Amino acid sequence: MLGLPPSSFSQQRQPQMDNLNALNEMFGGQLPFNPAMLAGMQGQQQQTTEVTSDPSRLYWNLIHVSSMLWLGIYAVYTEWNTVGKDRFASLLWMNPTESISNGFTGVQFPLFWYFVTLELMMQAAQMFFQEGQAHSGSMLGSLAAQLPHPFSTIIITGLHYRTLWSCLVQDCCILVFVIGIAEVISAILVT
């Protein structure tokens, strides 16, 4: 490992074993654990383990981020072209009742329906392509594989809903961020 010869690992473990044997002799051989087992555990902790993540998870996250960025940018662009930058800038400092009296009426862009449609399409595609493989890397998913049928089904269903909810919240946060940045930029441009 790490370009070192195997003999250097055994040389590093020898002082650990000597220390543990001395500790065992100090307590009169009454340690409640095996020093060799403890040294093996320490050796395992020192070795770096590489966690393999599912590459498709990275692609789904990239699809979610890029689609929400494009939706947010499209919504801002449409609002700027329809109503102008003044309306976006006024959202930062005006009361909603004042904006109606100044002639700004209603929502021009049906962002909610576009968001719901896009979210449903992405979630359905993700569930279709992954077919229950989405939770194989999580600790709770591996626990569900060990449990009997009714309990594993409940846990896997809960994990699916948790994934749906976390993607929904992340996508909403991306949209709110893009729209908020657009409001600040329009306020700077107007003043």
Image (cartoon, rainbow, N blue to C red):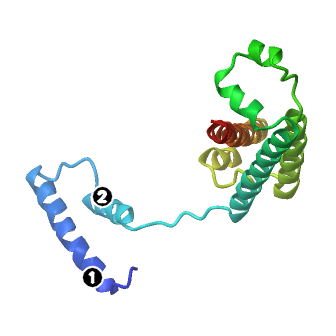
Q: Is residue 188 left or right of residue 148?
A: left
Q: Quadrant of residue 15?
A: bottom left
Mark 1, residue position:
8
Mark 2, residue position:
38
Q: Which mark is residue 60?
A: none
- Which structural element holds mark 2? helix
Residue displayed at 68% across by 39% down:
186
Figure quadrant of the C terminus: top right
Q: Nearer the viewer, mark 1 or mark 2?
A: 1
Q: Establish if 147 lies above or below 14.
A: above
Amino acid carrying label 1: it is Ser
How dense is the environment of label 1, judged by Cα within 10 Å: few (below 14), some, or many (20 and up)?
few
Amino acid carrying label 2: it is Leu
Q: Position of residue 117 (x, y in %)?
A: 91, 41
Q: Establish if 140 lies above or below 35.
A: above
Q: Position of residue 94 (x, y in %)?
A: 68, 20
Judge whether residue 155 can be spotted in this image.
Answer: no
Nearest the eye: 1 or 7: 1
- Looking at marks 1 and 2 on the same chain, the residue that comes earlier in the sequence is marked by 1
